[in-house]
Each structure stands twice: as C-alpha cells, then as structure tokens.
Image (tube, helix red, strand yellow):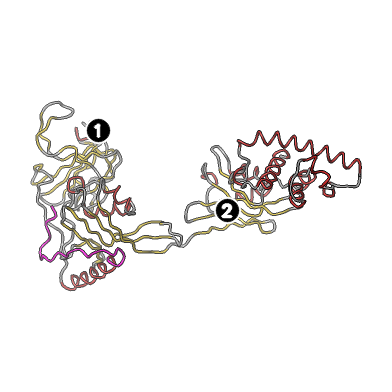
C-alpha cells in the first residue's frame, strides 16, 4: 500500500511540474494506468532512495532540521529541480518521504468501484474501506434491493471523510444506482447507517412522430425516434385490417401520437397509449383515433365513426413473414403435392399468437400432425385454428377476446421449422383466410358520435401543433372504408 501511495504522489508531482493532465496517468477510479506502473515503480524507488540519502545527509549535518525546512536553493542542483521556489515546495509537498509515510491517505475521499464477476458485495465493501460498517451497510441496502441479486458491472459510489485513526479516513456515504429512476443512498449518522431510495419523478407528456418506410417498419421508426413499444402497439391496432408483410411498401409513412412518461432529464420510463395513428399505404391514408366509449370500453375508430376492428384479425401474429399461402403445394416433409388449407407465418419460437376474434376455445392440446393446436369457435359458422405451437396458454371451454395471447410459435408436430399454421373454417370447410369476407365492427351513433368528432378535432389540432405538419385529408364517406 505504501509503495502504491508513493507512486500516486510521484506521478501527481511529475504531472504538476510538467503540466500534464491528471487523466493521462490515472483512470476514473483514480488508479494508476497499467502502462505507467512499471516505469513509475523504478522512478519511485530511485527517487525515494535519492531523497532518503539527501534527508540523511542534511539531518546528519543539522539534526533538528526537518525536510520541510531544507534550503531548497541548495538542494536544486542535487535533485535536478528547476523553476521557482514555490514550484519546488509544491514538489516536496507531494513526494517528501515524511508526507508519504505519515499523511498519505489510503483511500481517496470519493471513489467509484465496480462489482466484478464472482464478487460478493460484503467482501467488496469491506475491502474498499467501509470496514466494520459493512454489516450495517448490507442490512440497510437490503431494505430496497436483495444484495444477492446485485450483478457484475454494478457501480457503487463511496465517500469517506477524514478520521484520526490509522487509515486517516472513515466511511461516510454510499450511492448505488439501481436503474435510471431509482438510486439507493446510504448515509452514516453517528453509529447508525440510514438507507433512502432516491426516486426520480416521472411526468406524462404527449409525443408526435412521423416515419417514412425505407427498409423495415421497425428500422425506419427507430430512425425517426419512435419507440419499439409504440410501433408494436400501432401494428396490433392495424392488424385487424392490414397485413404488414404484404401491404407495406417503401415510401409509405406512419404517423403516431402517443403518451410518454419521462423524467425531467429526458429519460423515457415507459410509453403509454397510442392516441392517434395514420398509416399511409400507396398514397391511401388510414387515420385512427383512440376513443373511450360511454360503456367503459376503449377502441380505435376511423373518422366516420366505424371501428377498426373486424370479426377476425387479418394476421394473428406480429411481425411474421408469410412463408406459405393457401393452395396446392409440394409438401416440405411428405415430398408430394398436397393441398395446403391454411397460411403459414414464419416467426421465431416463442413469438406470441393472438386470438383472431372473440370466441370460445373448442380444442386446446395435441392434435395429430398439427402438434400443439388451438381451435376457437367465433359463431355458429366461423372458426379459426392455430397449429405447431411451442406452448398453449388457453384451455378448452375458455372464452377469449380478440387480441388475447393464446399461445406461442413453435415447431411441434409435422413441421420443418418454427412457424404458425393458421386456418379459417367457414361452415365446416377450410377457406383461404385472405379471401374470406368478414363483417366490420361497430359504428358510433348519436351523442357518442358527436363526442367522438370533438375528440377527433382536438387530437388533430394537438398533433399538428406537435409535429407541425399538414393535416391529412379526412374520410367523409358514410360507410367504412375498404382497407383490404
């Protein structure tokens, strides 16, 4: 420890005399950079030896003289010190043997340590100078976070204050940032250690963003600053009527206005509801507004008051690629031509699968070559089926709502890779899910329609003010727009 302290002081003195910045020799944790350690060790040893020799020579001549009272002008040629007397005194303030041996601190008053793999928090704190206060510190930290779950890479800010004990410093406080919102703060008061949780305030703001599709929806949205969660919500809203794999093209645009919960310094803690979205496909705009209805339900409506929802979602899975369509094909496992009575969506194992519409689970379990399989009855004539799941989340007889997660993509049964096999069964016959005609959802009327129109105008004004863009053309038809 003494040698390392000597090195620190020698480097500090050299840096000061040569006017070299502190960071060139030291890390942020105030540790000597390894590339200088060997050189400094040699210089320190040589310097201390010379200094010790000078000190013995001077004190032997004048026994009552201390290092601080040496005639600096007389020593300059011997030590090679050039410059003013003030600079020379500064040199001795840093590297005099008496200072190093008696007054050098073993800890900086403030330091940052990092938990390394395999470290135990208690061992690290005790090693870094918290000492006998370590058990109390661990107990205080445990009020807010389990010390066993503190992972490698966690940074801890330690503060020490002067003390008259051997080390010269004693533990004063600790800060540990758990996440961008929460920080555990420990303070020593007399003999007790008090723990507090410093939590940043989060406020609700409204954000408006616009993205033009260049390659992928997620990539283009990210470039425009739209969070992934907002993109996923928008895709789910439009999934009743839009197939993002087939309908979206380069040059199309998406506009969104959404809730964002942020700290004062701009950190986004989470995103909330999408209040407005406008998807442009091939020049055709599809604006949607979030609206709370009188009966407590919330839905997204077109400007005419028609709900975006249909009896069935067009794609019951997010971000999947259609790998096989409905019709005759060469079977990838059996090797001969066979009618494919559904649509396959390729997606990673574990991707959520949604109920395409409201209904009752008719079957949930293993079903022949389909593997893990779910079938939902929506009405007397309409059913949907989902096959090759890795996991089923519903049970037979359970009622589900459109958009509920019923299972996850897998490759069970007769399958060559992770995908969802999706079927629509109409009057007992499998039909092409892309061509079947299903009715559109409800339409607002009367006072509720008038209220919706007011909400829509307010959202329009707010969106334009936030984005400073042209207002899109309103749909004026009295019937639902054809979004297929």
Q: In the displayed structure, would residue 1 be above or below residue 357?
A: above
Mark 1 / mark 2, whichever is N-terminal: 2
- Name the quarter where the N terminus is drawn: top right
**Which residue is farthest top?**
335
Q: In the displayed structure, would residue 364 be above or below residue 465?
A: above
* Image coordinates for residue 204, horizontal then vertical, percent: 38, 64
Segment tinted magenta in the rendering: 464-484
Q: Nearer the viewer, residue 249 or 57?
A: 57
Specify whether 30 is left or right of 151.
Answer: right
Q: In the displayed structure, would residue 287 be above or below residue 92?
A: below
* Image coordinates for residue 182, horizontal then vertical, percent: 50, 55
Residue 417 got which mark?
Answer: 1
Q: Is residue 465 magenta?
A: yes
- Tell me how many marks there are: 2
Badge 2 is on which residue?
A: 175
Q: Mark 1 or mark 2: which is in front?
A: 2
């Amino acid at each position: 420890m003494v040698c390392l302290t000597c090195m620190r002081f020698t480097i500090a003195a050299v840096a000061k005399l040569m006017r070299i910045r502190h960071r060139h020799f030291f890390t942020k944790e105030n540790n000597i950079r390894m590339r200088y350690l060997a050189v400094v060790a040699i210089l320190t040893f040589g310097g201390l030896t010379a200094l010790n020799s000078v000190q013995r020579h001077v004190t032997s001549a004048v026994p009552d003289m201390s290092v601080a009272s040496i005639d600096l002008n007389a020593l300059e040629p011997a030590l090679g010190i050039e410059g003013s007397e003030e600079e020379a005194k500064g040199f001795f303030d840093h590297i005099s043997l008496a200072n190093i041996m008696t007054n050098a601190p073993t800890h900086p008053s403030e330091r940052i340590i990092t938990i390394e793999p395999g470290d135990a928090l208690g061992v690290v704190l005790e090693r870094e100078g918290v000492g006998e206060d370590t058990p109390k510190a661990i107990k205080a930290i445990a009020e807010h976070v389990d010390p066993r779950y503190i992972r490698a890479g966690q940074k801890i800010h330690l503060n020490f204050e002067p003390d008259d004990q051997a080390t010269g410093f004693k533990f004063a406080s600790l800060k540990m940032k758990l996440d961008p919102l929460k920080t555990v703060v420990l303070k020593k008061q007399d003999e007790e250690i008090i723990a507090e949780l410093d939590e940043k305030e989060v406020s609700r703001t409204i954000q408006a963003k616009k993205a033009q599709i260049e390659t992928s929806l997620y990539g283009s949205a990210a470039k425009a600053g739209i969070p992934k969660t907002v993109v996923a919500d928008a895709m789910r809203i439009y999934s009743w009527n839009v197939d993002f794999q087939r309908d979206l093209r380069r040059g199309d645009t998406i506009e969104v206005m959404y809730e964002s919960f942020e700290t004062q310094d701009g950190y986004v803690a989470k995103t909330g509801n999408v209040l407005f979205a406008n998807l442009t496909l091939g020049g055709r705009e599809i604006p949607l507004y979030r609206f709370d209805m009188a009966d407590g339900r919330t839905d997204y409506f077109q400007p005419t008051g028609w709900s975006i929802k249909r009896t069935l979602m067009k794609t019951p899975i997010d971000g999947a690629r259609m790998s096989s369509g409905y019709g005759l094909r060469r079977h990838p496992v059996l090797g001969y031509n066979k009618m494919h009575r559904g649509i396959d969506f390729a997606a990673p194992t574990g991707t959520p699968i949604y109920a395409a519409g409201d209904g009752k689970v008719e079957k949930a379990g293993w079903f022949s070559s389909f593997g893990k399989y779910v079938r939902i009855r929506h009405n007397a004539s309409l059913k949907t089926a989902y096959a090759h799941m890795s996991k089923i989340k519903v049970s037979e007889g359970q009622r589900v709502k459109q958009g509920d997660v019923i299972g996850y993509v897998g490759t069970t049964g007769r399958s060559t890779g992770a995908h969802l096999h999706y079927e629509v069964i109409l009057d007992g016959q499998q039909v092409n899910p892309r061509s079947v005609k299903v009715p559109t959802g409800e339409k607002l009327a009367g006072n509720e329609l008038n209220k919706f129109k007011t909400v829509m105008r307010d959202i329009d004004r707010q969106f334009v003010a936030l984005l400073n863009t042209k207002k899109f053309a309103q749909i004026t038809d009295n019937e639902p727009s054809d979004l297929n």
